[in-house]
Image (cartoon, rainbow, N blue to C red):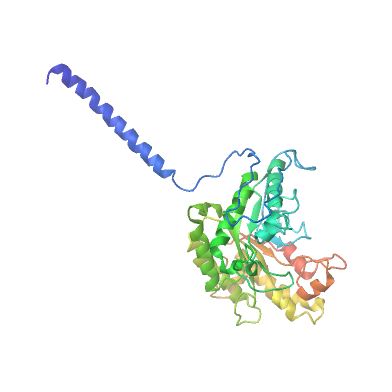
């Protein structure tokens, strides 16, 4: 090899080494971007082509029309970041209990809701609700677009309301008893199709409001192996679409949802919550997602005391149910003193009390655990306590 050839080889070898390093780095970048897609940082309104349902398409077909592109009346002129505090209310009627208390109800039908504390609810996305007289499909698209156009940023949507429940109560047939499709199994026996429908609902919401956050769950029987198995199948079915579960929400009540050995079920209720967090939240790899308790209350005890006067019922529920549950959630030092050996809140970020308000005096007498007197609008002892107690975890 002559001198000129050696010089050329000496120049080419480093060049090939640099190219090789660049190829390796490029391959690593390609491999790293193969996971769940990132949510858009700067979304723009999409075209008005309607997404197609993945389950059996019902008849007649959806009749949704494109939402108006003009802001609703009263919309804020600038984007408003939504703020959800740790103290919540499950239902409509009582606002201003704290500066930023979260609340939710079945609000999808209201196209624009200016209150930044509201979490919208799609309780049971069956064909009957979405494409029948409920017209839920149209309502979801319109509500999500209204939030986006109005500048709301981060609206939370809660999808499914007790899909594991077979219990009927004052609110009617639970989601767990309903069927996603006519003639299909009840939702509580159909977790795979429930996951597919959840993925569709997520797509419909985020096609209109890419800033929305969508939570799955609404489970009632947290200590039940059947509920845990349902959740496992649901998550496994989502597969690579697991990113669509941006948060999780659960419900808990005494006697309805746990087997009680104590008079007020507090160790059992908090034990079920602690167990769910460890087994079904961390254990399912969901620890990076927020976990909310979107219904908690004293429902069965209201039934127990309905024969007594409400004046006698309220202090009992406040002192024996609301206060200790607040201690547990806030990691208050009083919790360990009253319930030694039972761990406090492991990581739940919000707690919504049910039922805060009812204008129906018969319903209020049956539940007995509301925040306002139906006849006068005055705070009950429960409302007074919830207003003043800071449940922010220590």
**Residue at image location 40% in from the left, 40% down from the top:** 29
Note whether residue 135 is visible: yes
The quadrant the N terminus occupies is top left
For the residue pair 130 and 168, the one nearer the viewer reads as: 130
**Residue at image location 53% in from the left, 67% down from the top:** 230
Residue farthest right in this picture: 376
For the residue pair 248 and 96, the one nearer the viewer reads as: 248
Q: Is residue 328 left or right of residue 76?
A: left
Q: Is residue 288 left or right of residue 301?
A: left
For the residue pair 146 and 375, the one nearer the viewer reads as: 146
Rendered position, 181 above or below 313 = above
Rendered position, 311 above or below 204 = below
Instruction: Measuring from the top left, give residue 59's x and y in whole percent.
Output: 67, 55
**Residue at image location 55% in from the left, 44% down from the top:** 39
- Label count reads 0
The quadrant the C terminus occupies is bottom right
**Residue at image location 84% in from the left, 68% down from the top:** 374
Residue farthest top in this picture: 4
Instruction: Measuring from the top left, give residue 308's x and y in whole percent.
Output: 80, 81
Q: Quadrant of residue 95?
A: bottom right
Q: Quadrant of residue 34?
A: top left
For the residue pair 374 and 234, the one nearer the viewer reads as: 234
């Amino acid at each position: 090899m002559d001198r000129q050839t050696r010089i050329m080889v000496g120049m080419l070898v480093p060049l090939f080494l640099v190219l090789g390093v660049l190829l390796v780095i490029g391959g690593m970048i390609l491999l790293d971007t193969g996971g769940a897609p990132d949510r858009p940082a700067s979304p723009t309104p999409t075209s008005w082509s309607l997404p197609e349902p993945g389950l059996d398409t019902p008849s007649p077909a959806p009749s949704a029309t494109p939402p108006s592109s003009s802001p609703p009346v009263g919309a804020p002129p600038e984007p408003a970041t939504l703020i959800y505090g740790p103290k919540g209310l499950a239902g409509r009627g009582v606002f201003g209990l704290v500066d930023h208390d979260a609340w939710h109800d079945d609000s999808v039908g209201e196209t624009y809701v200016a209150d930044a504390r509201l979490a919208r609810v799609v309780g049971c996305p069956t064909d009957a609700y979405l494409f029948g007289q409920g017209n839920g499909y149209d309502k979801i698209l319109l509500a999500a677009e209204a939030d986006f156009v109005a500048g709301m940023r981060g609206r939370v949507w809660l999808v499914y309301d007790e899909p594991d429940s077979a219990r009927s109560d004052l609110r009617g047939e639970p989601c767990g008893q309903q069927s996603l499709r006519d003639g299909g199994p009840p939702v509580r026996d159909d977790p795979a199709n429930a996951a597919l429908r959840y993925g569709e609902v997520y797509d419909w919401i985020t096609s209109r409001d890419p800033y929305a956050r969508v939570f799955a769950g609404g489970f009632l029987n947290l200590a039940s192996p059947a509920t845990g198995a349902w959740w496992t199948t649901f998550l496994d079915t989502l597969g690579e679409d697991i990113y669509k579960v941006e948060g999780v929400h659960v419900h808990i009540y005494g006697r309805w949802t746990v087997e009680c050995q104590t008079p007020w079920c507090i160790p059992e209720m908090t034990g079920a919550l602690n167990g769910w967090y460890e087994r079904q939240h961390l254990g399912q790899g969901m620890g990076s997602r927020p976990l909310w308790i979107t219904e908690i209350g004293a429902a069965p005890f209201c039934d127990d005391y309905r024969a007594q006067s409400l004046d006698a019922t309220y202090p009992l529920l406040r002192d024996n149910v609301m206060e200790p549950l607040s201690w547990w959630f806030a990691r208050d030092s009083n919790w360990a003193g009253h319930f030694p050996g039972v761990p406090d809140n492991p990581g739940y970020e919000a707690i919504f009390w049910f039922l805060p308000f009812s204008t129906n005096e018969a319903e209020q007498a049956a539940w007995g655990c509301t925040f306002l007197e139906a006849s006068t609008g005055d705070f009950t002892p429960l409302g007074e306590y919830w207003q003043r107690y800071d449940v922010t975890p220590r």
